[in-house]
Image (tube, rainbow, N blue to C red):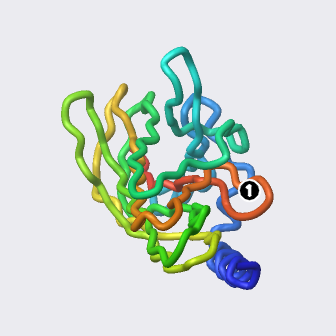
Amino acid sequence: MFRLLNLCSSFVRRSAKRFINMTDGITDPGNNNILQNFSDATAGRSMQLYWCTDVYDSTGWDYVMNRDSGNSRMIYIQHATLFDIDYDITINKPTIFQGQAILDFTFGLNSAAGASACYIVFTVYHYDGVTETALGTVTSETVAKSVDTLMVGKVRIDISRKLFGVGHVLRLNAVGHNNGNGNVVLYMNPQTAGEELKLWMPVVNLE
């Protein structure tokens, strides 16, 4: 498991090199929901970073996206066969998303009780309060193991062009699948290893 994690982490570090400059201090303080980490004025495009986390109130746990990192109270979510989670954020100004999104995540298998095969399907949605429209989807690699395993992933999601009006919702849906020999796990705050769950969304700058 340690060797597998090291290999995966090495791959993530190599894959992430081309995105390092995206976090060099470019922010959009006028938008309460969006941290704009990279902007290319010539191309008219930018990347916006969203962190997936949880909140708790009198109705129980809810899952959201926001601009802050490291504040998830719940370390991970898990289920023996299937979980289906939506991470939502309300957009506060007109925004067009289009291009390749980047998703960082950590997932795997715990409480292994025999040969297992688990994976997660991620889908990005636009929701206007009435209709939910899929903009792009991707499936993680499959963890086929009989021992507890932690994997670090970085995937691209092709996002169809969509205008989000004020009050529309950007949603990341995560559906975990497993054959039942243990639990499929998706981490929001790995703490000791791995990546926090976060989504880079490609934006077409409005004129």
Q: Is 46 situated above or below 69?
A: below
- At x 58%, y 35%, the residue is 54
Of residues 88 and 148, which is closer to you in this image? 148
Q: Does the rendering let one see residue 24?
A: yes
Residue 81 picture location, percent across and down: 40, 58
Furthest-right residue in this view: 192
- At x 56%, y 44%, the residue is 52
Furthest-front residue in this view: 113
Q: Tell me the crowding category of disc 1: few under 14, some 14 to 19, or many 20 or more residues within 10 angstroms, Cα based.
A: few
Residue 132 picture location, percent across and down: 24, 41
Residue 10 picture location, percent across and down: 71, 81
| Residue 14 shown left or right of residue 134 in the figure | right
Judged from the image, the secondary structure of the residue bearing numbered disc 1 is loop
Q: In the picture, which quadrant includes the C terminus?
A: top left
Residue 186 picture location, percent across and down: 55, 56
Query: According to the image, label 1 marks what residue?
Result: 24
Residue 192 occupies quadrant? bottom right
Q: In the picture, which quadrant includes the N terminus?
A: bottom right
Of residues 114 and 199, which is closer to you in this image? 114
Furthest-top residue in this view: 58
- At x 43%, y 30%, the residue is 90
Amino acid at dot 1: Asp
Of residues 120 and 124, which is closer to you in this image? 120
Residue 56 occupies quadrant? top right
- At x 59%, y 40%, the residue is 53
Q: Does the rendering let one see residue 204?
A: no
Instruction: Give the total number of marks visible in the rendering.
Output: 1
| Residue 41 shown left or right of residue 171 in the figure | right
